[in-house]
Amino acid sequence: CRQALRSAAGPEVDFARAEREYQLYVGVLRGKLGLQVLELPADESLPDCVFVEDVAVVCEETALLTRPGAPSRRKEVEAMKKVLESLNLNIVEMVDENATLDGGDVLFTGREFFVGLSRRTNQRGAEILADTFKDYAVSTVPVHDALHLKSFCSMAGPNLIAIGSSEAAQKALKTMQQMSDHRYDKLTVPDDAAANCVYLNIPNKGHVLLHRAPEEYPESAKVFEKLKDHMLIPIANTELEKVDGALTCCSVLINKTSEL
Amino acid sequence: MTTEVGSETEVKKDSEQLGPDKAKDKPEEASETPVNQKSRETSSEEAQDSSSVPAPTSQSSPGSQKKEKASPESKGISRFLPPWLKKQKSYTLAEPKDETKKRTTGEEQVVEESEGQTSEGVAQPKKSLEEAAAENQHNVKANDKEEKHSVSSAETQPAKDGKETEVEKVAEEKEEKQEEKEKRETKEVQTVEIKTEIIPQKSPKKSKTVQCKVMLLDGTEYSCDLEKRAKGQVLFDKVCEHLNLLEKDYFGLVFYENSEQKNWLDSSKEIKRQIRSLPWIFTFNVKFYPPDPSQLTEDITRYFLCLQLRQDIASGRLPCSFVTHALLGSYTLQAELGDHDPEEHRSDYISEFQFAPNQTQEMEEKVAELHKTHRGLTPAQADSQFLENAKRLSMYGVDLHHAKDSEGVDIMLGVCANGLLIYKDRLRINRFAWPKILKISYKRSNFYIKVRPAELEQFESTIGFKLPNHRAAKRLWKVCVEHHTFFRLVSPEQPPKAKFLTLGSKFRYSGRTQAQTRQASNLIDRPAPYFERTSSKRVSRSLDGAPTGISDQSLLRGLPTTGGQAAGDKILDIEAAGQAKLKEGGEEEDGSPVKTPQLELTQDGKSNSLRVEGENIYVRHSNLMLEDLDKTQDDLLKHQASISELKRNFMESTPEPRPNEWEKRRITPLSLQTQGKKGDHIFQVKTLPGKEKQWTAMPWIAGAKPEETDKRHASRTEGPCTGVSDADKSSHETLDIVEEKKQAEVGIEETLVVDETNKGKMQVATDAGEACKVEHLSKKDSSSLPSDSSSSSSSSESEDEEVGEYQPHHRAIEEVIREEQEEEEDVKRKEHEEKIQHVEATAEGSKLSVPVEHTQVTTEDLVQENAVTIATEEKNLSEEIKQDLGEEKEEEQLRLNGDVSHVDIDVAPQIICCSEPPVVKTEMVTISDATQRTEISTKEVPIVQTETKTITYESPQFDGSAAGNAGVLLSAQTITSESISTTTTTHITKMVKGGVSETRIEKRIVITGDADIDHDEALAQAIKEAKEQHPDMSVTRVVVHKETELAEEDEE
């Protein structure tokens, strides 16, 4: 099962609407997909704490607590740490003060990691990630003109990378393709923001894909709709997008059953 | 005396030894000595007789003549044949003693018998004599060869020889000494016993065995005695035999230089040439990690791979996460201990194993926990599971080398099955798949790769890395060459080409490729061999002890090696030279050095020149190289040998005045002109401005000093000893040559273009490669002048140019051709290697055809023609060389000068770029397909329900090209090949439409494998590679037909 963790919303957004969207998001995960969702308590002192993805990278039995690139977010890690500890994961903390890493820069394909080197993530942070997940190749991808690597891409299937059409996105994709021994399929969508989707492989439900709603990105939605094998669930994310939030940002997917 | 194999030499030695002994003995034993003297004086007749005797034997076997001589002497029987009289006379002197009479009778008989036995018989008489006389086992031991022969002889003539032989032997020996005057100083002989003593002395000389120790993967040690001159293959085969390992191509032997540098033993070379110091200690290791171990045929092979990986993991070379350590450890336990037994396996049973560099209690507990879950797995299954997990590790099979990038930043270069990986710290910062790499080279401590232009780029780029030293660079280069060859190349399909086009550095991977080894292993027909899985405890212990071979090579690499780095190449060359000599003169070791050098020279060719420069290039795609190994290894060795000499000469030669600027100008303009059309070339010229001026100088120099070189060659031939000194000298070379090389390169590049065009024309005229040959031959014959080759259509410039330039041209041309061939090979590779399930690629305007100006001719044809002509040219050259030694040298030097390796690369790109059709993006793929369900039975499983999917990806362009099919069909061919996990059927159709030739390649690739993931991966990889490999070709359609067993579908 998978659990989505989340906390409160950010400022300067239609909070009520953001709340509705968030509830829908959680509702889908919990209700429709039957996932166990652990929600982190909201902390008003941490405006970005809704974007839980950035503070932890979880792969198999190991969780890496990051050191977010934005100093104001460093404290978000604490709440995450508590929850992860309760899940009996092997927890690795990024203590090196020269290292920064946002989970939004980490793309795990199932076979390897790509780490975007962005304003939020540096080489040292990527190294620590590589040390943490030694089984996997960790390749670095320069990210320009975007907040995070996953601001314009994400996994949309077991071997399928959804990628935006912007120059930055395409450039990053080329880099990833060159760096990988594997060959990924790509799903190119017109809108970078829409390329960030949440893929889940759930027993008895198969391939599930949460993607941005047609009302937001109609052209991109059409592309997603061509994925015949996927259970497609459009989700609006208009409000959080205003603060650079994408669909993946609001959850950390963990393949583990909680005993809580 | 040159080397004649064992028996003769041994005999000689014996005789020699005995002789001195006798001499010494004489004073001691007065009675005997006087007899001998008497015999000498008196028995001239006898001597004649003896001489006559050997003659018949000698006829039977020339090699054994010497022996025969000896034997007849002793026997004193030979009366028939006069030719040997001279030598024999001396022999006879010794013989006359007491037993002369008896000898004549008895020995004659013996001789006759031996004659009857043919060649063996000839050898035997001597042996028999010796043995009978000495009756010493020592002899046998000392000389293996002798032993064999002697044994037989002894058996045949036991009684007769007995008494007589003893005396005879002494006499013979003495005689031999006198005759041959090869004086080894053995003292005290004549009695049988004494002889025995002598014999042991002899033995060390000839048999010369060296003890080898090989550390095996299970921690045990294997030792054996090898002949000193044995090649690496001999030892490797012995080890594999000891291990009962058939799929041995994945493995290799490692030795350490200075206890720090890890080197792979080249099985095609003599061991002693590679490992300079005693003792000979090796470790048996996996050299090529199979990407999919499940495809190995035998469990025992997987077992050894497991052992290697356990070492890798425990030493930290192969990093794993905690979970993976635990999982792999648990499989190790299952394989080695069987099912978990709570009674037997207490809590501490695990701590004796080492699963990880830093093993914790927690990990051991986890291992034990997982071990319990593997109940029922057989050792073989457990190993398989182990491998399935290990192969997914990102560093599986990655051979790391320390390096610095162009900015001096520390990085690691990782060589693996798929290509070259670049790491900074633990992060992968770049990757170059083999298909993307056009050329690999190294120069001094720099390592270069030339990569194809990226999609939007026009030019190829060369990326340089700085290795700690020259040797490290060479090691890396070799590893790359080997990995590329092993994993990327299928079996060479066009042997003839291969011969001709052998270029590049001397080194090539001499083993089988993975594809070949798989094919071979498919033929393995034996019951699964029994083998005992030794506990990995041993392994871990050995790790602790830091035995040879286990230590992390990457760490070792970092250590700087002082001095002799530059010489590294050269040393190798020297080695090669030594080998060449040996081979050539299997019979003439000691003797005529003069002959060998000449031979070498004639055969040398390109490789030499390349090497001389100290720059080694490996052009991927060149299946040819593999072929070369098989066929022309000797030649290669010879080449190498000569190279070292050439290098010296080159170095020693005083610099000549520069060539006329005049000619330079001439040349350059031409090249420019020809190239002008080809954008790429111009570009290159610009980059190289400074060098152009100087380049011409080289050829001149070469020409000027032919005589000197000759002399030197002669002196050099003497042997390995000189070789060492050469190495030292060679180190100097680099300094001197560097500039020159560059110059030469530049010049060549320019000229190359011209030649190429010429050739193209020539080919056109002749169409057939043979015709070209004829022309060349005639030219050569007529003219000892260097300017012949490209002559017919060639520009006046080439003619005007001096000899030196001429050859470079040739070479350049050759290389160009290579490149072309490479291109072709790419195509072929696509066919074979690409795993795309139906790929139709259309090349618009073949690359080759454009540059050559033959639009109608198919590219392949052109290439082939070129190759042929080149080859012929080379041959001709060599012939010419033979005729005129002086010229030979000149030419060779020229070759040396023209370190064309770089040049070719440059040239090739030009061609390619010019002709390349616009790159079509095939990425816009529409998935249009339907899923059908049918029942299909797979091979392995009789009845399985399968799911069949057919997906067609078409690029928009396809329609256009397909629609225009109105062209004329030039050729069509279908090639089927099997590689690793795929069976590829390639159908190539060549059409001409409106003057534009179109090559359509349709590949049907059947990928079989267990895991779904692999299929996707393979397919994706294939498509990717196809694109990368043929930027000029576009993938117009991909049809994927997927059959999967439904049962397995659950996975994901």
Image (spheres, coloured by chain):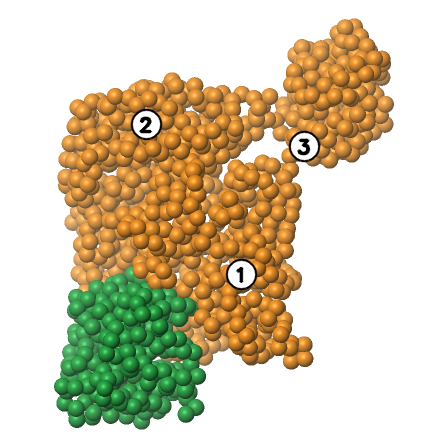
Residue sitting at 40 percent across and 37 percent down? B566
Residue found at the very far top of the displayed protein: B42
- Residue depicted at x 36% and y 40%: B444
Q: Are marks 2 and 1 in contact (CB under 8 Å)?
A: no
Query: Quick check: do tags 1 and 3 share a chain?
Result: yes
Quadrant assignment for the N terminus of chain B:
top right
What label sits on residue B403 in the rendered view? Answer: none
Q: Which mark is residue B311?
A: 1
Labelled disc at residue B204: 3
Identify the residue at image location x=63%, y=71%: B337
Say what amino acid the circle numbered 2 marks.
Leu
Residue assigned mark 2: B894
Which quadrant of the figure has residue A211?
A: bottom left
Judged left or right of residue B204, residue B1024 is left
According to the colouring, which chain is green? A
Dot 1 or dot 3, earlier in sequence: 3
Check chain identity for marks 2 and 1: say if they share one. yes
Instruction: Find residue B911 and report its horizontal and vertical position in percent.
Output: 22, 43
